[in-house]
């Protein structure tokens, strides 16, 4: 991967995605989580303090050794057991129907085969289980979207494989999960930053078979 992606990007992410605005959105993404939860792309553990007490355990999937090391202090503070159970969201070790919920924050932009990862999310959720997500992605304004497509190759190189132009709700629905509400908006900031700031806070459910 290289020094920049392996050692620098996780540290930048740890700072950039910890603003007070983003931490408030993390709390909203984590509200209602309970039981056995899988977190896709645990990163440096910035959701650790937002897990509600109803969560019984967290299985963390995280490929970055630096990200995992950066999360150590946050994991140590958690009153909920957390274990690193995998390195790749595209191939989860868990059996089918294992989790009450799956959480993903700012990870679906980065996983190379996001369709495959979302099929895995659906597979490991129990029927009726929910997928909570907080992600950035494709903006609704054509001008912004054009810039997102132009910038995508650079974004990928600079930010560990991140894409700006993924339509996250469409990808979630395309994996067979039923959207149960998505709030979309640009985050506050200058207009020039809009390719990076369009965000989705949402829930989706694995339907119980009739
Ligand atoms: C922008 S960071 C977000 C980290 C964390 N989720 C957060 O909210 O702060 C993207 C994360 O996706 C992880 N990632 C990249 N490829 C992945 C994969 N195939 N499976 C799971 N996570 C992956 C990265 O290691 C990184 O931790």
Image (cartoon, grey):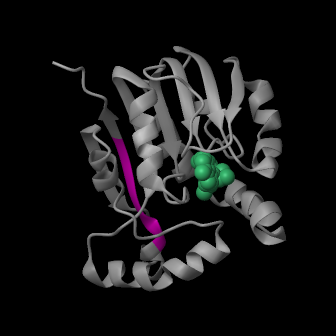
Write the start and end of the magenta stretch as one range.
Answer: 196-202
Residue 185, image x, y percentages: 33, 60
User: Magenta stretch: residue 11 in it?
Assistant: no
Most prominent secondary structure in the magenta stretch?
strand
Residue 124, image x, y percentages: 46, 28
Figure quadrant of the C terminus: top left
User: Magenta stretch: residue 199 in it?
Assistant: yes
Residue 153, image x, y percentages: 54, 80
Task: Residue at 60%, 67% (x, y): give it.
Answer: 161
Answer with left or right where residue 208 lies relative to residue 151.
left
Answer with left or right where residue 152 lies relative to residue 156.
left
Q: Residue furthest left?
A: 210
Task: Residue at 49%, 57% (x, y): give it.
Answer: 113
Near-viewer residue (206 or 90) = 90
Is residue 194 placed above or below 80 in the rendered structure?
below
Answer with left or right where residue 38 lies relative to residue 80.
left
Residue 73, image x, y percentages: 82, 35
Task: Residue at 66%, 18% (x, y): give it.
Answer: 80
């Amino acid at each position: 991967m290289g020094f920049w992606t392996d050692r620098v990007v996780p540290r930048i992410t740890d700072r950039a995605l910890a603003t007070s605005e983003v931490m408030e959105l993390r709390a909203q993404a984590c509200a209602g989580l309970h039981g056995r939860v899988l977190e896709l792309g645990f990163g440096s553990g910035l959701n650790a303090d937002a897990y509600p007490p109803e969560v019984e355990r967290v299985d963390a999937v995280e490929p970055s050794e630096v990200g995992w090391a950066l999360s150590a202090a946050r994991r140590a503070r958690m009153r909920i057991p957390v274990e690193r159970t995998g390195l790749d969201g595209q191939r989860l070790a868990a059996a089918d129907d294992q989790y009450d919920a799956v959480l993903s924050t700012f990870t679906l932009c980065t996983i190379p085969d996001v369709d495959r990862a979302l099929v895995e999310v659906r597979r490991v959720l129990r029927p009726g289980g929910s997928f909570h997500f907080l992600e950035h992605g494709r903006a609704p304004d054509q001008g912004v979207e054009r810039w997102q497509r132009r910038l995508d190759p650079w974004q990928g190189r600079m930010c560990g494989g991140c894409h700006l132009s993924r339509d996250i709700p469409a990808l979630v629905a395309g994996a067979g999960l039923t959207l149960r509400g998505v709030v979309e908006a640009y985050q506050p900031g200058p207009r020039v930053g809009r390719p990076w700031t369009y965000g989705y806070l949402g829930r989706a459910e694995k339907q119980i078979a009739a």
